[in-house]
Image (spheres, rainbow, N blue to C red):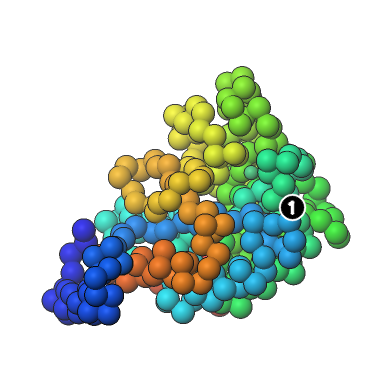
């Protein structure tokens, strides 16, 4: 548990006492548990139908995060803070999987389309001054494309402050059950990193496991510092330099009170140590330090 100042301790105990008073008999079960760490949320597509999350639900979640005082942070910024032993307050990582994924599995039908991204996701993120970690499937992206994902567009997003993470090269379904031979996994790790480095100028530090299926983790750790998993609840807390991070599924938090109850406790936590003011570009956005 992080150290609290006297003022924070009084504030916390007052909040607990209030909860107890208000909730009476149910109080002990209802007291909000304090949580430390930098929470990570996993998003896919946001679109009005056949989607994990509707535009209204996505807007609600961003509005709640903003009103709780959250600021978004990249994997690199989070890692820097945690390696300095600082747990910054009110920071959160928003990941978006399957950017430019050419596959169309029923299991993974949630690929963000270029149109939905531009209509429902990007404007909402930018309305609240948020950035995100984009999990890009690198293997089939044209340099230019007026109607879909392109390296030109991804590079533009990177320069605006979005983090570009690898979500493999091909999103091969054989990775789901580890049926891809080891050499195939190694190519997915390395070649997607190389492609991002070639196209954006810097290699990604984060890899998002396709299907959340973790295989050959040690080899992945030879290339990436942060490895994102799925389906589990959790937050990024560094224990060693190379880490695997579970992510919250937004599907579980579609109601505003539930979402607030889940992420609210993270907003006030941290050791409160100083964090460097991140450099900003001319749009006032945080520059990606990758
Ligand atoms: Zn995926």
Residue 255 place in picture, x, y as percent? 53, 68
Picture residue at 50% right of the left edge, 46% below the top = 231
To which quarter of the image does residue 285 belong?
Answer: bottom right
Q: Residue at x 46, y 72 (%)?
A: 257
Q: Nearer the viewer, residue 242 or 267?
A: 267
- Measured along the vertical axis of the image, is residue 224 above or below residue 38? above
Image region (quadrant) for ligand 1: top right
Q: Is residue 115 left or right of residue 263?
A: right
- Residue 246 screen position, x and y as percent: 45, 47
Ligand 1 is within 8 Å of the C-beta of the residue at disc 1: no
Q: Quadrant of residue 263?
A: bottom left
Disc 1 marks which residue? 151
Determine whether, in the image, residue 39 is placed left or right of residue 58: left
Front residue of 149 and 257:
257
Question: Residue extending furthest front?
Answer: 25
Query: Quick check: 77 above or below 273?
Result: above
Residue 175: image location, x then y, percent: 62, 30
Tell which residue pokes out farthest to the right in this image: 146
Circle 1 Cα neighbour tier, 10 Å, few/some/many (<14 / 14–19 / ≥20): many
Residue furthest left in the image: 6
| Residue at 56 percent of width and 61 percent of height | 132
Q: Which quarter of the rendered picture does the N terminus lie within?
A: bottom left
Labels in figure, total:
1
Which residue is located at x 24 percent, y 70 percent? Answer: 25
Side (left or right) of 180 relative to 38: right
Q: Looking at the image, can residue 169 be seen?
A: no
Residue 163: name its quadrant: bottom right
Q: Nearer the viewer, residue 149 or 6?
A: 6
In this orientation, which residue lies closer to the viewer: 21 or 157?
21
Label 1, secondary structure: give it. helix
Say whether residue 27 is visible: yes
Q: How far across and down, in percent of the image, does residue 205 sit?
A: 50, 46
């Amino acid at each position: 548990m992080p150290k609290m100042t006297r003022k924070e301790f009084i504030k916390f105990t007052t909040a607990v006492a209030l909860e107890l008073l208000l909730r009476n008999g149910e109080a002990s079960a209802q007291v909000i548990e304090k949580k430390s760490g930098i929470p990570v949320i996993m998003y896919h597509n946001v679109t009005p139908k056949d989607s994990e999350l509707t535009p209204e639900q996505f807007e609600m979640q961003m509005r709640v995060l903003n009103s709780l005082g959250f600021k978004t942070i990249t994997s690199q910024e989070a890692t820097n803070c945690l390696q300095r032993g600082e747990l910054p307050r009110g920071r959160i990582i928003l990941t978006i999987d399957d950017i430019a994924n050419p596959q169309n599995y029923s299991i993974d039908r949630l690929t963000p389309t270029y149109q939905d991204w531009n209509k429902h996701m990007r404007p909402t993120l930018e309305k609240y001054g948020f950035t995100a970690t984009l999990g890009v499937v690198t293997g089939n992206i044209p340099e230019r494309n007026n109607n879909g994902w392109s390296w030109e567009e991804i590079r533009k997003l990177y320069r605006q402050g979005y983090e570009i993470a690898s979500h493999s090269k091909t999103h091969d379904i054989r990775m789901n059950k580890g049926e891809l031979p080891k050499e195939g996994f190694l190519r997915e790790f390395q070649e997607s990193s190389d492609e991002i480095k070639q196209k954006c100028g810097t290699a990604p530090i984060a890899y998002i496991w396709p299907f959340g299926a973790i295989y050959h983790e040690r080899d992945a750790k030879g290339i990436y510092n942060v490895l994102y998993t799925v389906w589990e609840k959790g937050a990024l807390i560094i224990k060693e330099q190379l880490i695997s991070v579970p992510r919250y599924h937004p599907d579980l938090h579609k109601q505003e009170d539930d979402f607030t109850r889940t992420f609210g406790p993270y907003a006030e936590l941290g050791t409160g140590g100083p964090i460097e003011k991140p450099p900003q570009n001319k749009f006032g956005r945080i520059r990606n330090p990758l």
